[in-house]
Amino acid sequence: MYEDEHSLAFLDIHPLNVGHTLIIPKRHYPSMGEMPLDEVGQLFVSVAKVMKGVRRATKADGINIGQSNGRAASQEVFHMHVHIIPRFDNDSQGGLTFPERKNMEPADRETIGKRIREAIQTRS
């Protein structure tokens, strides 16, 4: 869906909401704590760019940005990654909880991925 010199973004296979996107650095780091600060900054430039595209493509009312470091913080995949989760006024109890994960067909993921990619490209 999105790629630059330092990062790669793709849709979560079991999203909390349609458009739930993961962004990873191309270099391997188990968590943010192992990343050089300049690379953290580069990754979050990409996060901001993709977040704007996700919000525009999904017409979300809000966005959660999530990132966990270590098992105690609920990290399950030990490659640094950031979640971009589109949120809608009616998707949970006032944003206090997350909605249930969804199963999406590959064709539906392709459609929303294309819309997000186009939204990213049309934004500066």
Image: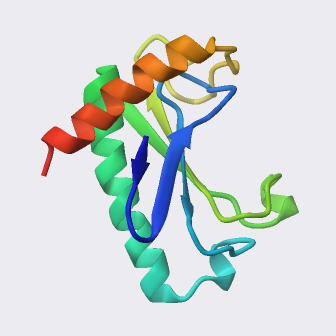
Apparent side of residue 90 relative to residue 31 in the rendered image (left or right): left
| Quarter occupied by residue 58 | top left
Apparent side of residue 23 relative to residue 120 in the rendered image (left or right): right
Task: Please say if 81 is above or below 1.
Answer: below
The structure residue drawn at horizontal position 62% and vertical position 58%, both measured from the top left corner, is: 81
Can residue 60 be seen from the camera position used here?
A: no
What colouring does the structure picture have? rainbow
Apparent side of residue 87 relative to residue 118 in the rendered image (left or right): right
Can residue 27 be seen from the camera position used here?
A: yes
Task: Please say if 61 is above or below 29.
Answer: above
The structure residue drawn at horizontal position 63% and vertical position 11%, both measured from the top left corner, is: 105
The percent coordinates of residue 17 (x first, y second) are 54, 22
Counting the numbered discs, the total is 0
Task: Please say if 2 is above or below 73.
Answer: above
The quarter of the image holding the N terminus is: top left
Task: Please say if 5 is above or below 8.
Answer: below
The structure residue drawn at horizontal position 53% and vertical position 42%, both measured from the top left corner, is: 10
| Quarter occupied by residue 3 | bottom left
The percent coordinates of residue 92 (x first, y second) are 56, 17
Apparent side of residue 95 relative to residue 98 in the rendered image (left or right): left
The percent coordinates of residue 47 (x first, y second) are 40, 56
Nearer to me, 124 or 86: 124
Nearer to me, 51 or 96: 51
The percent coordinates of residue 43 (x first, y second) are 44, 68
